[in-house]
Image (spheres, coloured by chain):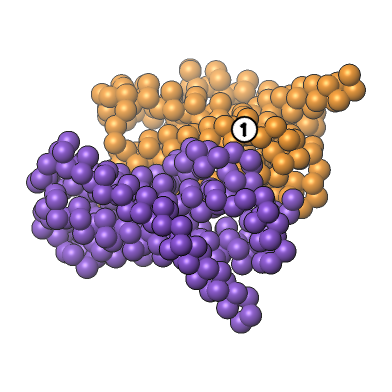
């Protein structure tokens, strides 16, 4: 119970830090908006569901990579020592992963709303699409956060976390895109199956991060 | 590597290579003689998978005991697995050109294979970016385990989802490997030894590569 409450405290702390240094949140929102506008300028309103789904997930992917790669980037050496003594490694990675997952879940849904506004929604079942966007974004965010941790411990900037994370996120996005395509074309049962698989992926990524992070953090 | 394993590898290759080119194969529409690629292309993936598994086992062992030898072995196995992966892709592309009339197609297994290779190329980038040997070993072991588990889940499960359209055998309504034999010439008599041969050859290659890198490291440390 104690460790759960400290994870929760740390997640709130991350959120407060984010509110205080407004650049992070504003940057993330601006990033989504700009990429949406670029996509809209390039393609315009979309009729074909394949193109719609592909573009949606590319926009979401880049916003996820952008925001999750920040999660370990702003730690100064002094703050790292503080974290080292304050939290157990498992608590730290869980707090940051869950925070990023929640953040990207919300920003993914908002981005999705703006995307629908600009590009139109070519039919489909909205609730399952929303669920797919939510679980897909959070799964990719969990992977991105862990890769941000790897990049940070390796002494490289957040640039490396994108290089490491992108190949690992591709299968997640393939599943999410496939599920969304079913949702658009009326294959509801399959769409829910993909949503369930993405949910399992969330759990798997969190579990792996929890198990492996202590080895990264023992410097 | 034990000598009897090397002898087994060579013996298996003496059986597999002539049989792959000259042995009788089952006659299938569209495939015809290209079915011989079964012994090269398909087996590459099996071997790559086994090599990566061994690499992950060494990675886990490194995290437990911090023995740098384990990291060097893990690296050598990954390198050979990457080589096998590239051979697998190239042989697959050639095969696809003659049966599906295209080098590359939107097939979940093709893309899964390509992503696996990308992920392990990222592993090499990660290794190259860390100057400190101990840190490099630790971080790349963690990344290797993470990537392997995710890749296995996604590469093994995703293409097997019922609705996925694939041109590969046994999926999307295509006949499976079980149909590729008839009683007279059972291709499995070559297929399974081929997996054995390429896998053992891979371990042998990895072993040599590990020994060269290990000696280089020691001689650098002494000089």
Residue B203 visible in the current orientation: no
Q: Is residue B188 above or below residue A104?
A: above
Picture coordinates of residue A117, whole percent (x, y)? 14, 55
Q: Quadrant of residue B195?
A: top right
Q: Residue at x 61, y 67 (%)?
A: A91
Dot 1 falls on a residue whose secondary structure is loop
The hue of chain A in the figure is purple
Q: Is residue B95 above or below residue A86?
A: above
Q: Quadrant of residue B103?
A: top left
* Classed neighbour count for the residue bearing mark 1: other residues with Cα under 10 Å, few (<14), some (14–19), many (≥20): some
Quadrant location, the N terminus of chain A: bottom right
Picture coordinates of residue B98, whole percent (x, y)? 31, 21
Q: Residue at x 48, y 50 (%)?
A: A70
Q: Residue at x 52, y 42 (%)?
A: A158
- Please tell me which residue lies in front, B122 or A42: A42
Q: Pointer 1 indicates a residue of which chain?
A: B
- Please tell me which residue lies in front, B46 or A89: A89
- Please tell me which residue lies in front, A50 or B57: A50
Q: How many marks?
A: 1
Picture coordinates of residue B160, whole percent (x, y)? 37, 51
The hue of chain B in the figure is orange
Direction right: furthest residue: B222
Residue at which label 1 appears: B129
Residue B121 visible in the current orientation: yes
Picture coordinates of residue A98, whole percent (x, y)? 48, 65
Direction bottom: furthest residue: A1
Q: Residue at x 62, y 32 (%)?
A: B129
């Amino acid at each position: 119970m104690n460790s759960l409450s400290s994870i929760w405290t740390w997640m709130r702390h991350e959120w407060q830090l984010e509110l205080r240094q407004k650049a992070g949140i504003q940057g993330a929102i601006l990033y989504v908006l700009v990429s949406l506008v670029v996509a809209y300028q390039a393609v315009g309103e979309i009729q074909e569901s394949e193109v719609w789904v592909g573009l949606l997930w590319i926009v979401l992917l880049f916003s996820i990579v952008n925001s999750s790669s920040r999660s370990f980037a702003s730690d100064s050496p002094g703050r790292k020592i503080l974290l080292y003594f304050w939290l157990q490694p498992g608590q730290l990675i869980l707090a940051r992963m869950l925070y990023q997952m929640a953040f990207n879940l919300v920003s993914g849904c908002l981005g999705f709303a703006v995307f629908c506004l600009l590009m139109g929604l070519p039919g489909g079942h909205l609730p399952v699409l929303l669920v797919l966007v939510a679980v897909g974004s959070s799964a990719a965010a969990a992977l991105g956060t862990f890769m941000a941790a790897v990049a940070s411990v390796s002494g490289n900037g957040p640039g490396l976390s994108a290089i490491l994370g992108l190949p690992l996120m591709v299968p997640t996005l393939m599943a999410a895109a496939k599920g969304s395509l079913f949702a658009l074309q009326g294959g509801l049962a399959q769409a829910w199956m993909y949503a369930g698989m993405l949910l399992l992926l969330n759990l798997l990524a969190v579990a792996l991060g929890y198990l492996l992070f202590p080895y990264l953090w023992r410097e | 590597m034990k000598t009897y394993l090397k002898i087994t590898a060579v013996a298996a290759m003496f059986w597999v290579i002539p049989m792959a080119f000259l042995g009788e194969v089952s006659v299938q529409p569209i495939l015809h003689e290209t079915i011989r690629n079964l012994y090269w292309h398909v087996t590459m993936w099996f071997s790559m998978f086994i090599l990566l598994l061994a690499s992950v086992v060494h990675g886990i062992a490194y995290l437990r005991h911090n023995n740098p030898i384990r990291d060097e072995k893990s690296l050598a196995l990954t390198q050979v697995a990457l080589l096998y992966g590239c051979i697998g892709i190239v042989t697959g592309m050639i095969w696809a050109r003659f049966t599906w009339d295209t080098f590359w197609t939107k097939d979940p297994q093709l893309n899964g294979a390509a992503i696996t290779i990308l992920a392990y190329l990222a592993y090499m980038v990660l290794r190259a970016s860390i100057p400190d040997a101990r840190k490099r070993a630790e971080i790349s072991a963690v990344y290797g385990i993470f990537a392997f588990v995710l890749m296995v889940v996604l590469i093994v499960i995703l293409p097997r989802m019922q609705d996925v359209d694939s041109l590969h055998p046994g999926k999307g309504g295509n006949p499976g490997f079980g149909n590729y034999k008839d009683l007279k010439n059972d291709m499995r008599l070559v297929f399974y030894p081929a997996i054995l041969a390429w896998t053992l050859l891979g371990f042998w290659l990895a072993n040599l590569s590990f020994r060269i890198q290990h000696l280089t490291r020691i001689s650098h440390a002494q000089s």
